[in-house]
């Protein structure tokens, strides 16, 4: 069928129609991110996609983070064959089952009684020697047995439920062992008094020394984890999934409540995987919160995202619905903020609940493919 319109005019009309039609968000313009080396998925291999004969490189994915209990030689080999790095997640202070046979490892509250788990997030007393040995032995086993590219600490903080809009962070652990250890390490002697009185003193007059001692205990765990990596698989990275707050958010809870001293831990950690789950943590309409928290962390630890830097920031960002939903229209924005410097890698939370939401998976793949160098 011939047209009466001259060809150049048709071309012009086509261009105008194309320019005016709204692009679906999944096809929106994406800035290149040459500094991003890791485009990861957290929560295991995307088997649902691999079964469709899709290969990780065509999905733009080059890193898989999975629970250390799900590692198998076959799985690691399959992922590595597709060019992906494999990282294990390691539960440090949250093996709740341990308390069944070792009730003396339960964190003790300000009143001297066992402190119930806030919203089920059970922590463990950080000075329980057998629990510590149990975790260190397991850490060593995972590194010895599996050819992984790194291992990430998870729940490395005190007994608390902070992964929510309003955190619940009881003061612990005032067990006799912790009180004794504090007095020895901090060179402090506490009066003979009931725990309820001593906890008042430690959260009052002695607070600075108490808070720093608790942070130092948790940092010392990280020192030992590092030494195990150095002995068993020195090429592997040590990462940590950690609370995304600044040191002033929630009245300094990062140190005061959670016992996380980022600067001290930076002596042993290679990669900080800050967890800015914007929707879950009360910023559902504000994905820019992700890059603000990452920028704060970079400033705090003097990480710029430059090539060759020892310390790295690879945020884990929320795409799956948890608490609040993450709409498909937000996927690009979340990944945009998650991949801004000083970040040099990113991963998405979390495959198990994300994979049935195929529109969001498609948007993630689209973004990853576009930023792939
Ligand atoms: Zn204790």
Image: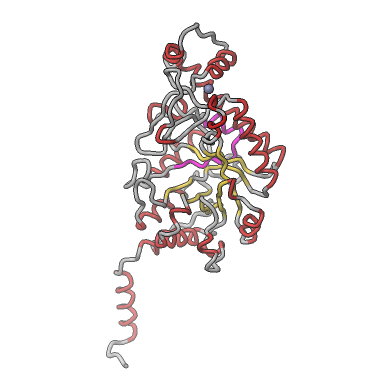
- Whole-percent x, y for residue 203 in the image: 43, 17
Q: Determine if the magenta segment contains residue 168.
A: no
Residue drawn at x 36%, y 45% is 323
Farthest left residue in view: 4
Specify whether 226 is left or right of 327.
right
Q: Which residue lies furthest to the bottom in this view?
A: 1
Residue located at (43% from left, 31% from top): 117
Q: Residue 275 at what x, y percent from top left?
A: 46, 42
Residue at the far right in the pictured view: 231
Numbered label tally = 0
The answer to whether residue 350 is visible is yes
**Figure quadrant of the N terminus:** bottom left
Q: Where is residue 258 in the image (x, y as percent from the top left)?
A: 47, 29
Task: Say whether residue 357 is left or right of residue 154.
Answer: left
Please give the range of residues in magenta.
262-275
Q: Which residue is drawn at 58% across and 50% down?
A: 70
The answer to if 269 sits in the magenta stretch is: yes
Q: Where is residue 4 in the image (x, y as percent from the top left)?
A: 27, 90
In this view, the residue in front, 156 or 174, is 174
Q: Which residue lies furthest to the front in this view?
A: 101
Who is closer to the viewer here, 174 or 85?
A: 174
Foreground: 330 or 14? 330
Compared with 185, 286 (above or below) is below
* Image point (38%, 39%), residue name: 164
* Quadrant in the picture for the C terminus: bottom right
Does 252 sit above or below residue 73?
above
Which quarter of the figure has residue 232? top right
> Is residue 205 visible to the viewer in this orientation of the structure?
no
Q: In which quarter of the image is residue 308?
A: top right
């Amino acid at each position: 069928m011939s047209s009466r319109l001259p060809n150049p005019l048709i071309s012009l009309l086509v261009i105008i129609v194309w320019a005016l039609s709204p692009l679906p968000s999944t096809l929106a313009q994406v800035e290149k991110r040459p500094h991003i080396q890791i485009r990861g998925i957290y929560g295991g291999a995307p088997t649902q996609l691999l079964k469709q004969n899709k290969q990780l490189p065509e999905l733009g994915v080059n890193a898989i983070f999975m629970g250390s209990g799900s590692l198998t030689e076959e799985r690691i080999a399959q992922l590595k064959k597709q060019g992906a790095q494999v990282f294990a997640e390691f539960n440090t202070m949250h093996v709740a089952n341990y308390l069944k046979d070792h009730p003396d490892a339960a964190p003790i509250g300000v009143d001297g009684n066992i402190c119930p788990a806030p919203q089920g997030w059970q922590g463990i007393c950080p000075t329980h020697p057998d629990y510590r040995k149990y975790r260190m032995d397991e850490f060593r086993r995972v590194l010895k047995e599996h050819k992984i590219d790194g291992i990430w600490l998870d729940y490395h903080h005190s007994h608390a439920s902070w992964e929510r809009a309003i955190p619940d962070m009881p003061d612990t652990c005032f067990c006799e062992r912790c009180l004794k250890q504090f007095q020895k390490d901090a060179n402090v002697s506490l009066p003979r008094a009931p725990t309820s009185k001593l906890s008042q003193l430690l959260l009052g007059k002695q607070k600075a020394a108490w808070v720093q001692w608790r942070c130092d205990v948790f940092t010392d765990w990280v020192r030992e984890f590092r030494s195990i990596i150095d002995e068993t698989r020195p090429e592997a990275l040590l990462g940590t999934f950690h609370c995304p707050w600044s040191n002033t958010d929630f009245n300094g809870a990062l140190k005061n409540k959670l016992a996380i001293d980022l600067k001290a831990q930076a002596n042993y950690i290679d990669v900080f995987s800050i967890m800015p789950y914007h929707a879950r943590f009360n910023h559902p309409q504000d994905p820019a919160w992700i890059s603000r928290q990452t920028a704060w962390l970079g400033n705090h630890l003097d990480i710029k995202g430059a090539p060759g830097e020892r310390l790295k920031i690879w945020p884990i960002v929320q795409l799956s619905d948890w608490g609040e939903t993450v709409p498909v229209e937000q996927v690009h924005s979340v990944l945009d903020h998650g991949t801004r410097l000083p970040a040099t890698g990113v991963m998405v939370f979390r495959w198990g609940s994300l994979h049935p939401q195929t529109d969001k998976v498609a948007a993630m793949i689209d973004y990853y493919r576009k930023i792939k160098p």
